[in-house]
Amino acid sequence: MAPPAKRTAKHFPAHIDQEKLPIGVTYVPMGKGRWIYRKGAGRKQRGKEIRFGSSASTLAEIWQFVENLETDSVSTFRGISRKFQDSSDWRTLTPRTQKGYEYLHRTICETTTKTGTKLGDIPLDAWTPGAVRRYIENKSSTSAAAADVRYIKRVFSWAISFDYYLKSNPAKGVMLKNMVSPRTHYAQDKDYCLAIALAPLNVGLAAHLSYLTNKRRTDILNLRRHQISPAGVEFEDSKTGKLSIVGWTDELRETIHVAMEIAGDTLLLFPRYGSPHERMTDSAFDTAWQRVRSCVKLAGGVPFQFKDIRAKHASDLETDDEATEQLLHSGTQVTRRHYRRRPKKIVSLR
């Protein structure tokens, strides 16, 4: 394969002199154009990619942006959040988690307070449990508020471990419990079977494998041939890192057999278009499942989310303890609250 063509002056805006750009800044001409800054050199030393500006940005604006980044103080939430995103802790996170955290960083930091100051720029000593509570009460979505608080708590905990002028975590005292009501929808057998029947083969296989193995979408999409063993299907939980083996049943063996007939050389399901070694992205699968939900609704069924399949698996088991063990939970409280959704039968007195 030929090396990529070296970017020449014609790829940069005409009013920008490349020789005068700050170190670590480059330009991406795609779309409306954007500038990218990455601090450090080498794969292990480089910080995260920060996008800013457009093709209309001046050289002075580019320098001002980079200087503000490099002099960013740890006395603001924006400063400690960016340092967290340049840390070794950040590099251990999955790309999907990083992307979500970057969105939360922008949302929180760009929120304007009553005084007109950006929330990311107010001093750290102004962050109190009350201030965090007032912030989340102004959010229109309780799930978004809960995600914001979790990120704020994560950043402050990391900052405290590095003694960044913090003695306590202001988000720690904010109660997250009951901010978001747990889902209660139980996918009925007829709706589940309808979804499997209407889905494309690979999407239906992913759904049924999720039900049979009680694994998340990410674990199913990551499934590879080498995970198939004589004892069963081996998994490393993408969320907890726990190792488990789902033992063979006749139905699981048959489903895996069908999946392996359409599998790529490495991936068991969904090789990315044009590359048999890259899996289908989460967003692409979400789009495919949304189409399945639409088909179920048109056919007169009740559509359900893909994550409801794990809850169906847990609900179809006999006891809470059995469901907790199979879901790899440390206790039955989470299992009962979020996964045991099947309505209980009540015997009539007459």
Image (cartoon, helix red, strand yellow):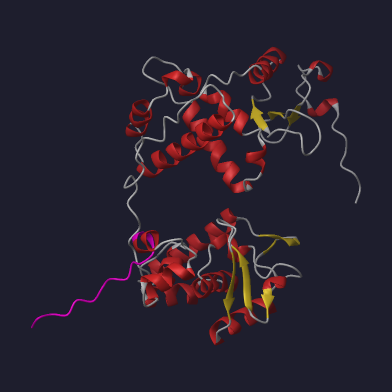
Where 129 sits versus 193, above or below? above
> Which of the pair 342/321 is nearer the observer?
321
Q: Residue furthest top?
A: 60
Q: Is residue 86 visible?
A: yes
In this picture, residue 68 sits left or right of residue 342: right
Q: Residue furthest left?
A: 350
The structure residue drawn at horizontal position 48% and vertical position 66%, both measured from the top left corner, is 327
Q: Residue furthest bottom?
A: 250
Quarter that holds the C terminus: bottom left
Where 188 sits versus 117, above or below? below
Secondary structure, magenta segment, majority class? loop
Q: Is residue 262 visible?
A: no
Count of marks, rendered view: 0
How far across and how far down the image is residue 114, in percent?
36, 18
Where 134 sits versus 67, above or below? below
> Which of the pair 246/193 is nearer the observer?
246
Q: Residue furthest right?
A: 2
> Which of the pair 331/77 is nearer the observer?
331
> Which of the pair 261/316 is nearer the observer?
316
Question: Does 349 lie within the magenta span?
Answer: yes
How far across and how far down the image is residue 223, in percent?
65, 67
In this picture, residue 116 sits left or right of residue 285: left
Q: From which residue to which does the magenta span run?
A: 337-350
Q: Quadrant of residue 193?
A: bottom left
The structure residue drawn at horizontal position 59% and vertical position 48%, both measured from the top left corner, is 96
Q: Quadrant of residue 74?
A: top right
The structure residue drawn at horizontal position 75% and vertical position 62%, both measured from the top left corner, is 277
How far across and how far down the image is residue 299, in percent?
39, 72
In this picture, residue 216 sits left or right of residue 140: right
How far across and how far down the image is residue 314, in percent?
41, 70
Question: Does 260 lie within the magenta span?
Answer: no
